[in-house]
Image (spheres, helix red, strand yellow):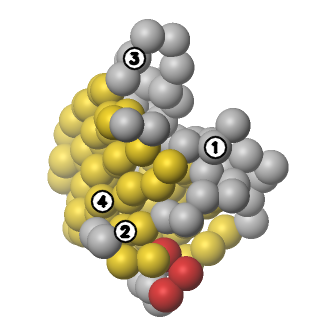
Amino acid sequence: MYKTVAGIRSDIENPGYKKMVIAPQPGGNFTQASAKFESLYGQVQSGWKIESGKFILDVTVPPNTTAIVILPSSANAKITESGKDTDQLTYLKKRPENSKNKVFEVGSGKYHFEYTLTK
């Protein structure tokens, strides 16, 4: 469940959770999910919920690690992180995205993403 629904997994090219991927997959009757994972570097957390059509994702990346955050169904959405437009934030590195999802690389810390789900 933590790998699929909450989306916590190790980066295939960098095993051991020094670099991880957070890619939650909402679906079915789920309207929220959260998971914690104790890595060698500290606790990784991913928790999301859908409220009034908004997708809200809280992520914790442990010290001395990085994460690729893949936001589901967000390609055309205006996304905020801790209330600020992600287009204005230099600490979020935009990565090439696929047709449905925006992708960011982040350093250690806590992040709070919000946006309206697109179809």
Residue at image position (37%, 37%) is 52
Q: Which residue lies furthest to the right in this view?
A: 99
Amino acid type, mark 1: Thr
Q: Which of marks 1 and 2 is nearer the N terminus?
A: 2
Answer yes or no: do the residues labelled 3 and 2 have beta carbons within 8 Å? no
Question: Can the viewer see residue 39 in this picture?
Answer: no
Answer yes or no: do the residues labelled 3 and 4 have beta carbons within 8 Å? no
Q: Crowding near pointer 1: few (<14 within 10 Å), some, many (20+)?
A: some
Which SS class for mark 4? strand
| Whole-percent x, y for residue 37 in the image | 25, 36
Residue occupied by mark 4: 112
Marks 4/1: CA distance? 18 Å
Amino acid type, mark 2: Glu
Which SS class for mark 3? loop
Marks 3/1: CA distance? 17 Å
Residue occupied by mark 1: 118
Question: Can the viewer see residue 33 in this picture?
Answer: yes
Q: How many labels does the image show?
A: 4
Residue occupied by mark 2: 81
Marks 2/4: CA distance? 5 Å
Q: Earlier in the sequence, mark 4 or mark 1?
A: 4
| Whole-percent x, y for residue 77 in the image | 60, 58
Residue 30, disc: 3
